[in-house]
C-alpha cells in the first residue's frame, strides 16, 4: 500500500497494489500491519456501506461529539464522490479549516479521517457505493453536524447538491 499524508495532520490517502489477471483484479482493502508500519493507529470496530442512487446526493457534515476517538477509513467502491473534511480539533493548526478530495472507484484510493473532524460527501455519479471502516461504534445520540452550506466555511461544491435529507439541512450554523 502506498500512503500519502495530506496537508491536514492525521489525514492520509492510500492506494493498494492491485493484482490483475484474466479473472479481473484483486486488492487488499485494509491491512493493520501496513497502517502500523506507517505510524497510523487504527482499530476496526465496525464496517458500513453507504449506497447513493443519485448524483448530487449530499451526506453530512457529520461528526461524533464528546471524547470519541472515532476515526474512519473511507473508500469509494462504485462511482465517485467529492469528500470535504472540516477540522474540529481545537489544538490543531488547521482548526476550523476544510479541504476536499475526490475519490472514485477507478483510482482504488481511500482516505483516512482522524477523530474530531466533520465529514461530508457529495456523489458525482449515480449509484455510488462507499465503504467505511470505523474505529468506534455508532451511537446516534453522540452524533452532531454542520450544515453543508454554513456561510462560515464557504465550501465550494463542484455540483449543486440535489438530495439532502432534512436532518442535514436543519443543522445550525457553526
Image (cartoon, rainbow, N blue to C red):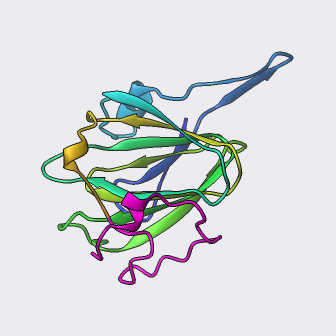
Residue 136 at x, y percent in the picture: 26, 35
Which quadrant holds residue 154? bottom left
Please tell me which residue lies in front, 80 or 114: 80
Left or right: residue 80 compared with residue 101: right
Q: Is residue 51 left or right of residue 148?
A: right
Image x and y of residue 23, in percent: 82, 16
Quadrant where the N terminus lies?
Answer: top right
The secondary structure that dominates the magenta segment is loop
Which residue is painted at 23% across and 63% down in the image?
89
Q: Is residue 33 left or right of residue 17?
A: left
- Is residue 148 shown in magenta? yes
- Residue 69 appears in the rendering: no
- Quadrant in the rendering for residue 35: top left
In this orientation, which residue lies closer to the viewer: 89 or 7?
A: 89
Q: How many marks?
A: 0
User: Vertically, is 144 above or below 43?
Assistant: below
Image quadrant containing the C terminus:
bottom left
Instruction: Tell me the residue at 55%/60% (across/down).
Output: 101
The residue furthest right is 22
Give the residues in magenta.
Answer: 146-174
Amino acid at each position: 500500500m502506498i500512503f500519502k499524508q495530506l496537508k491536514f495532520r492525521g489525514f492520509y490517502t492510500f492506494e493498494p497494489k492491485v493484482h490483475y489477471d484474466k479473472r479481473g483484479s484483486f486488492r487488499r482493502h485494509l491491512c493493520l500491519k501496513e497502517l502500523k508500519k506507517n505510524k497510523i493507529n487504527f482499530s476496526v470496530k465496525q464496517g458500513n456501506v453507504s449506497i447513493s442512487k443519485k448524483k448530487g446526493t449530499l451526506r453530512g457534515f457529520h461528526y461524533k461529539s464528546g471524547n470519541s476517538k472515532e476515526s474512519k477509513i473511507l473508500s469509494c467502491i462504485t462511482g465517485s464522490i467529492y469528500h470535504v473534511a472540516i477540522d474540529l480539533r481545537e489544538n490543531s493548526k488547521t482548526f476550523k479549516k476544510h479541504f476536499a478530495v475526490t475519490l472514485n472507484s477507478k483510482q482504488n484510493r481511500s482516505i483516512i479521517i482522524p477523530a474530531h473532524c466533520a465529514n461530508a460527501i457529495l456523489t458525482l455519479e449515480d449509484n455510488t457505493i462507499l465503504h467505511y471502516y470505523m474505529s468506534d461504534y455508532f451511537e446516534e445520540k453522540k452524533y452532531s453536524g454542520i450544515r453543508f452550506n454554513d456561510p462560515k466555511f464557504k465550501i465550494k461544491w463542484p455540483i449543486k447538491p440535489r438530495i439532502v435529507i432534512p436532518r442535514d439541512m436543519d443543522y445550525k450554523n457553526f
